[in-house]
Image: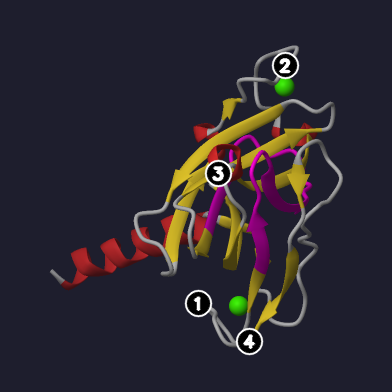
């Protein structure tokens, strides 16, 4: 019995040890390169800062304040280099004040955009998300010559709130992100 338990423990240890960490953004002392870009077609910028009052890990998180503006999209994101990985996993904590429906996108260098809808089950609460790069689909308005997400070509990761496209009036809101990990299967 003891031997079986030991074997099980060893196997569990091996399988967890195989997942390798590529990046870990903790938002303790910096925004870790995340910005809310301005000036792209129809995208309204927000103000991103560290929040030392509301976080899910450590002592701070990334908090972006923005306005849901009729006809506009809110986007935040950063540059990304995944190297030669075939598959990666994104694990992070997210808290959205008003918008439950988000879109995570991976952009190839030539602009091909791969998108994954994220539905938060609760507003104004930290929620853990675990996402595989295999879950992303080519965006409806996007073109890709090989119709395949090539991780080695990805140079950006973006989070979108498109609720402004259906909004009639402007409203203030916020989104917080923390403990953002990128892992490989090993
Ligand atoms: Ca943190
Ligand atoms: Ca491609």
Farthest residue toward the left? Answer: 1
Give the structural element (helix, strand or loop) at label 4: loop
The image's mark for residue 143 is 2
Point out the tag, 4 or 2, that comes first from the N-terminus.
4
* Crowding at mark 1 (Cα within 10 Å: few <14, some 14-19, many 20+): many
Is 161 located above or below residue 59 in the figure?
Answer: above
Q: The N terminus is located in which quarter?
A: bottom left
Residue at image mark 1? 56
Rounded to the nearest angstrom, the CA distance separating label 3 from label 2 is 28 Å
Viewer-side residue, 5 vs 17: 17
Residue 125 in percent (x, y) is at 41, 69
Res 149 → quadrant: top right
Question: Which quarter holds ligand 2?
Answer: top right
SS under mark 1: loop
Q: Nearer the viewer, mark 1 or mark 3?
A: 3
Figure quadrant of residue 129: bottom left
Under circle 2, the secondary element is: loop
- The correct choice, above or below, for 168 with respect to 183 in the image is above
Measure the C-alpha gap from mark 1 to mark 2. 37 Å
State which tag comes first along the sequence, 1 or 3. Answer: 1
Q: Position of residue 120 (x, y in %)?
A: 41, 53
For the residues bearing labels 3 and 2, Cβ distance under 8 angstroms = no
The residue wearing badge 4 is 52
Residue 44 in the figure: left or right of residue 117: right
Q: Nearer the viewer, mark 4 or mark 1?
A: 4
Q: Which one is earlier in the sequence, the residue at label 1 or at label 2?
A: 1
* Residue visible at 81% across and 52% down in the picture: 37
Question: To which residue does mark 3 refer?
Answer: 167
């Amino acid at each position: 019995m003891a031997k079986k338990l030991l074997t099980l423990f060893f196997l569990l240890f091996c399988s967890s040890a195989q997942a390798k960490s590529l990046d870990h953004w903790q938002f303790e002392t910096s925004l870790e390169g995340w910005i809310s870009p301005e000036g792209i077609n129809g995208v309204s910028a927000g103000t991103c800062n560290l929040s030392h009052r509301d976080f899910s890990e450590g002592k701070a998180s990334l908090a972006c304040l923005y306005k849901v503006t009729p006809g506009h999209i809110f986007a935040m994101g950063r540059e990304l280099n995944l190297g030669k990985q075939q598959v990666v996993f994104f694990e992070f904590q997210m808290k959205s004040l008003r918008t439950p429906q988000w879109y995570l996108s991976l952009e190839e260098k030539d602009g091909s955009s791969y998108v994954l809808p994220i539905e938060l089950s609760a507003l104004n609460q930290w929620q853990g998300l675990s996402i595989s790069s295999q879950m992303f689909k080519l965006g409806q308005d996007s073109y890709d010559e090989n119709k395949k997400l090539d991780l080695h070509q990805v140079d950006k990761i973006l989070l979108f709130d498109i609720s402004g496209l259906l909004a009639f009036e402007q409203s203030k809101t916020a989104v917080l992100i923390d403990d953002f990990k990128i892992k490989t299967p090993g």
